[in-house]
Amino acid sequence: MDESPAADELAGLRNFLKRLESGDMKLTVNGVDGTQHEIDILKHEIAHLEQVIARFKSGGQDAW
């Protein structure tokens, strides 16, 4: 992957996702585990960002 700031951000999000999925990290609010909910959101957002970056790299005018 290239060294762009967007690639760095995606790498950070993927790393965070892996830690959540592996159980190394949990997210709780008022004692309620919200980890799976956040995993689902992260997967969706990462996929969206990957699509936007791919469109931008391919010269798409309307990347967002």
Image (cartoon, grey):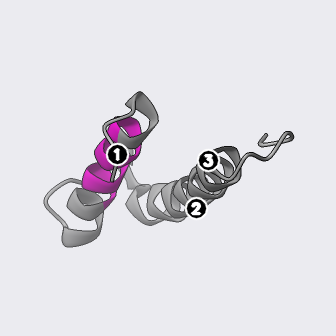
Instruction: Classify 10 Å Cα crowding around label 1: few (below 14), some (14-19), many (20 and above).
Output: few
**Who comes first in sequence, dot 1 or dot 2?**
1
Tell me the residue that label 1 is attached to: 2
What is the span of residues highlighted in magenta in the rendered image?
Answer: 8-17
Question: Disc 1 residue type?
Answer: Asp
Label of residue 47 in the image: 2
Mark number for residue 17?
none
**Left or right: where 23 falls relative to 38:** left
User: Residue type at mark 2?
Assistant: Ala
**Lower position in the chain sequence, tag 3 or tag 1:** 1
Query: Which quarter of the picture shows residue 17?
Result: bottom left
Q: CA distance from mark 3 to mark 1?
A: 11 Å
Instruction: Pick out the residue farthest to the right.
Output: 62
Whether residue 14 is in magenta: the answer is: yes
Camera-side mark, 1 or 2: 1
Work out whether 4 lies above or below 56.
above
Labelled pair 3, 1 in contact (Cβ < 8 Å): no
Using the rendered image of the protein, determine whether residue 55 is visible from the camera's viewpoint: yes
